Structure formats: C-alpha cells, structure tokens
Amino acid sequence: MLITISAIVVLGPLLLGSWVYCVLTGLAARRYLDQPVPDAENTEPISILKPLSGLDEGLEQNLRSFFTQDYPAFEILFAVRTEADPAHALVQRLQAEFSHIPTTLILTGEPPWPNAKSWSLHQMQQHAQHSLLVMSDSDIRTGDGLLKAIAKEFADPQLAVTTCPYRAIPGPSFWSKLEAIGMNTEFLGGVLVARMLDGMKFAVGPTIAARKSAIEAVGGWPYLQEFLAEDFVLGNEAAAKGLGVALSGYVVEHRIGAQPFAKNARHRLRWCRSTRRSRPAGYVGQLFTNPMPIALILFAIVPASWPALLLTFLLRMQAAHATAGLVLTDPLTKREWPLILVQDLLSFAFWVAGFFGNTIDWRGETYRLQKDGRFVK
C-alpha cells in the first residue's frame, strides 16, 4: 500500500504535467501553422555555406537540391579540409555541371578549433559575397523554393536569425528510423512549445539563415566555436541582444542515413549531454515531453491506473500527429506509428544516461564537455 501511494504521489503530478505538455504541443503546432506567410518581395542575393566532410549517404542529391534553387541571385560556398576528401571531387564535378551558379570551394586544412564545423563556417563567411547567409549541413535536402521563402522572411528588417524546421528521413537502419520518428515528434514538439511560451530565443541546426551582422554581434565564429551547440548559442545570444530570431515557415529534409546501433547510440548520447549543458533546466524539463514511460512505470506499480495509461497514449498520439502530421507532413510517422512507443522508451533511456558522464564522441574524436556547454579535447 505504501509503495502504491508513493508511486501515485510521485508519478501522478509528473504524468499530469506530461498531459498538459501534450495539449500544449497541439496548440503550439496550430499556432505555428497559423502564422502569416510573408508576401513581401525580396530578391536580395544570398550566400549558401556548406561545410563538408566525407561522402554522406545521398550527398550528391542533397547538394543538387541547392544548385537547383529557383532564385535569381545566390552563390554556394563549400569547405573541405583537403583535396583528399572525396567530397572535394564531388563538388568539382557539380561545379562543372552547374557552371552558371557562382561557387567557391575552400580548403580549410586541419581545424585549429575543437568545433570543426564552426571553423569551416568561419572560413566560408570570410569569402561570402553577400550579407544574408544560409548555413546548411551536408545531410540536408530541400525543395527549390527554400531561398525564395527565406528571402521573403528576411524582408522584415528586424529579423536577424531564423531556423528551418526539418523532417527527418532515415535510411534503412531500424535505429535511424526510430531516431527520425523521435525528431519528428518529440524534438519538434519541444521547439514549438518553447516558441509559443517564450518566443524563439534559440536556433537549431541543421539549416539556419542569419545576417552576417548578427553573427558578428554575438562574437562571431571565434566565440561560437567554443560551444558544441553553436547553433543554439547563436540564436540565444542574438535574442539576448534584442535581435529578431524566428522559426522559419519552410521545412527542409534532414537525411540522417542508416546507422548501426552503436553509432546511433553515441550520436544520441552526444546530443543529450550537450543539451544538458546548454540548457540545464530545459533538459530536466524534458521529462514532461515523454509521457509514455512515466505512465508505464505507474501502471507497472499500480495496475488500476490503466485508464491513465490509455489517456496518456491518446494524448501522445495527438501530439505526434500535430508535429509529424500537421507541421511536417511526415509519411514515416503515419505509416510506422506503433514505433513511437518504442522510440519513447529508448529516448527516455538516453535522457537518463545524459545525466552521467562529460565526454562525447564526434566524428571519431573524443571531447570533454564543460558545465557551460563549451568543449575541449
């Protein structure tokens, strides 16, 4: 009896908070969809920055989607470490095929900073001809309207940084499929709820647009490179300085590829540990974003709580539909919806693991995370 009462006292409020969060997710998704679509014409030139390292799965198709943008004035800058990188030859071939698109291929050498991506972005920004930058990871694929949509949004002179929501597309790996479902339901839900309750005070990769002036205002890449989550810090520092930060209305595809469990686990653990140090309070609050494990634990202790388990399931499905269905129009989550429950349990396990340890594995290198989100080798 004491165990039953204790479980209800401890888990009951957590479960109630999770129900509220699920409802907020649905409201936040609709608030996002109801935002006015910018109709101001803006054709200012744009510089696309593409840091590359190796041949990601589907890289050629990903890059082609940027060469074929329906936009009158843009350039693409690529950064690789050496000519030996196979991405170097691919870019050269695409340069020859799309010779009418201004492109620059930069050899950065070995990065002197722990954050190699920031080093590449720093080098490319120095060569970029235009003040409006679109920084996009190598695993992003997009429709031909991305730049047109970004330009319309930046017709607002107050806007300094914007983040594109992304629909995760997995490879054939079961583990990458679970991760994609998590990104399209749990992760995006957190972004939308934070936007609704507190405004956009952060940015998230893998596609960010920003004014050069905004990057310089927060200290530039020499400052941002100190952080593993440099994207979050860019948006957070910009908002703190009173600059406009927004969530774009344009959705891109994040091609996460196929990963075996060990590699996928290292990637997830890196993300959890990084998030815990970038947003400590927010990381603890993620407990409310994942209601099914809480409901299952309560049901295991108190079988009579099955109505709460059923209600939790229904609310979780509603929240998943709001993000993956309404916002992202994701066919994977609709088709494989039972995997949401599997992903929720796996996500909960990695969330718990994220409280322990301060090292991460990133592209074969081991780094140590500091309390403020900075990291060193």
Image: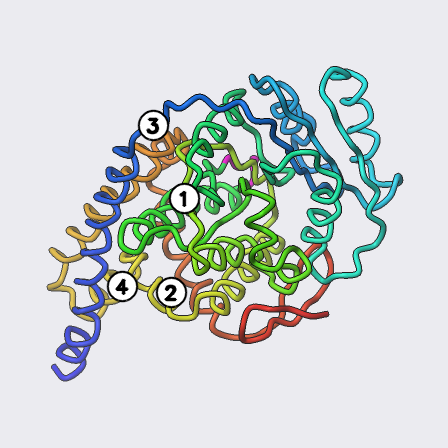
Name which of mark 1 and mark 4 comes first in the sequence: 1
Point 60% across, 27% down: residue: 45
Residue type at mark 1?
A: Ala
Closer to viewer: mark 1 or mark 4: 1
Residue 311: percent from left, percent from top: 15, 51
Q: Is residue 167 above or below residue 306?
A: above
Point 51% across, 33% down: residue: 253
Report the Cα–Cα distance between label 4 and label 3: 38 Å
Residue type at mark 4?
A: Ile
Range of magenta residues: 169-173
Report the Cα–Cα distance between label 4 and label 2: 18 Å
Res 241 visible = yes
The residue identified by callout 2 is: 282
- Between 138 and 240, the residue placed more toward the observer is 240
Name which of mark 4 and mark 3 comes first in the sequence: 3
Residue 237: percent from left, percent from top: 49, 59
Q: Is residue 218 above or below residue 245?
A: below
Horizontal side of 264 relative to 55 (left or right) equals: left
The residue identified by callout 4 is: 294
| Quadrant where the N terminus is found in the figure | bottom left
Closer to viewer: mark 4 or mark 2: 2
Report the Cα–Cα distance between label 1 and label 4: 32 Å
Display colour scheme = rainbow
